Image (cartoon, rainbow, N blue to C red):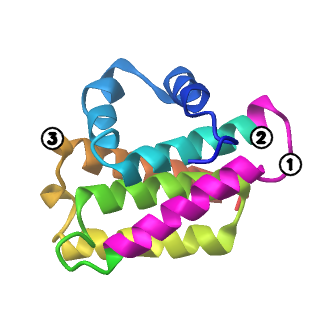
Amino acid sequence: MSPLVNIERLKHDCHKFFSSPAMRLGWLPALLDTRTTFLSSLCVSSIHRDFFVDSITEQSVRTRMIRTEVISQINEILQSSELQASDMAIMSVLQLTTCEIMSGSERDLAWHENGILQMVRLRNGLSELGVGGVLARVLTGYVSFFFVFQLSGFF
């Protein structure tokens, strides 16, 4: 990773802004399980830092670098019939979708949401997802959250 990316600071931000005791039990160990899921969480932390800590209105070079790497790794995963609908793939795309919500990219947001839907269908529904049921709960929460944003006219 580039020297422009302070991984320790992003990990700290991730823990400070997005962590809860419940998330640390199920979600966090799964995020740390692969490079792609870990980087996707850093992408969320980085874009959050851009907009809410550093108060910039565009994605930073750091965020764009991490996002590009995450997308590249996800594209590699999607080429594998064994991994394309894995928990790791779904988690990584969900984290990337969170970035799109923060950046307001409706086109990319729709793209990632459709991808998640296809992956869940390949797994035969939410009940077949792993991470001890946490992934299904997080996805369900995300859908509810996004629905409220749509109703409020945010998107």
Classify residue 79 by image quadrant.
Answer: bottom left
The residues colored magenta run: 51-77
- Secondary structure category for the residue under label 2: helix
Query: In the rendered image of this protein, does residue 101 appear above or below residue 29?
Result: below
How far apart, in angstroms, are the residues tagged by discs 2 and 3? 32 Å
Residue tagged 3 = 132
Cβ atoms under marks 1 and 2 closer than 8 Å: yes
How far apart, in angstroms, are the residues tagged by discs 1 and 2? 6 Å
Looking at the image, which residue is at 49% across and 24% down? Answer: 15
Q: Nearer the viewer, residue 122 or 79?
A: 79
Could one spot residue 27 in this view of the protein? yes
- Secondary structure category for the residue under label 1: loop
Q: Amino acid at mark 2?
A: Phe
Residue tagged 1 = 57
Which dot marks residue 51?
Answer: 2
Cβ atoms under marks 3 and 1 closer than 8 Å: no
Q: Nearer the viewer, residue 122 or 49?
A: 49
